Amino acid sequence: MRPLDQFLNLAATAITTAATGPALQAARRVADLLQTPPELAESYPATRLPVCDWLDTAYVTTRPDLAQALQALEPQLPWRTRPISSPDPRFPTSHASARILDPNGLEQRGGLLSGFSLVAPGVTYPEHNHPPEEIYLVLSGGEWWQAGGAWHAPGAGGIVHNTPGIGHAMRGTDVPLLAIWFLLPS
Ligand SMILES: [Fe+2]
């Protein structure tokens, strides 16, 4: 099986198992869309950035089968920085995002967008929002925040569900933050 299929199959099971309430409905939609036959994407070339050195630390807390599948996928990943502004001068070199399901990712499936986010310890990925509903599967430590709520640590295997348009942020703590996100088509 291709490393991408192996990882996404495990991720689909993980999110539908962990999600409850409104997040479960979104998680089931993600799992259904992941069954869509893949279409080609215009992929960025695989790239590794210096911040990716934190991946090995993040994997220590990742569920072993997910970590193994992600390590197999890693050589294909197009890690990039995001053009989001932050008051922290460390931010541009302390985060990375790798799009996997995207017109510029590894492939496309049913309009679902997906990628990995990595944030170094002690660094915050600033508040942002977007119209699509979003599910994160947390793969490591780190903390998460949503407008109107408090910072919390879902822990590896936890779910973060962002309703359409809600402000949200995340940060590495004493450990890096690693997660995969899925943006649902409307
Ligand atoms: Fe988001």
Image (cartoon, rainbow, N blue to C red):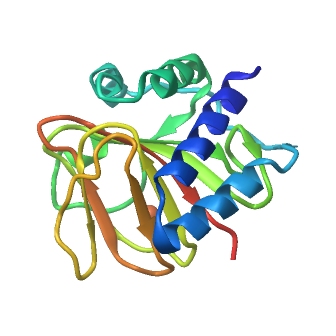
Residue drawn at 80 percent across, 48 percent down: 35
Asked whether, in this view, residue 18 is left or right of residue 34, the answer is left
Residue drawn at 17 percent across, 38 percent down: 121
Q: Report the number of discs.
A: 0
Query: Does 117 sit above or below residue 146?
Result: above
Residue drawn at 75 percent across, 61 percent down: 111
User: Which quarter of the image is occupied by the C terminus?
Assistant: bottom right
Viewer-proximal residue among 78 and 29 = 29
Asked whether, in this view, residue 180 is left or right of residue 90, the answer is right
Residue drawn at 15 percent across, 54 percent down: 88
> x, y percentage for residue 173?
14, 43
> x, y percentage for residue 73?
59, 23
Residue 117 image-quadrant placement: top left
> x, y percentage for residue 130?
49, 74
Query: Does 74 sit above or below residue 22?
Result: above
> x, y percentage for residue 40?
84, 41
Ligand 1 image position (quadrant)? bottom left
Query: Can residue 125 be seen?
Result: no
User: Which quarter of the image is occupied by the N terminus?
Assistant: top right
Residue 42 image-quadrant placement: top right
Viewer-proximal residue among 29 and 180 = 29
Asked whether, in this view, residue 141 is left or right of residue 5, the answer is left
Query: Can residue 12 be seen?
Result: yes
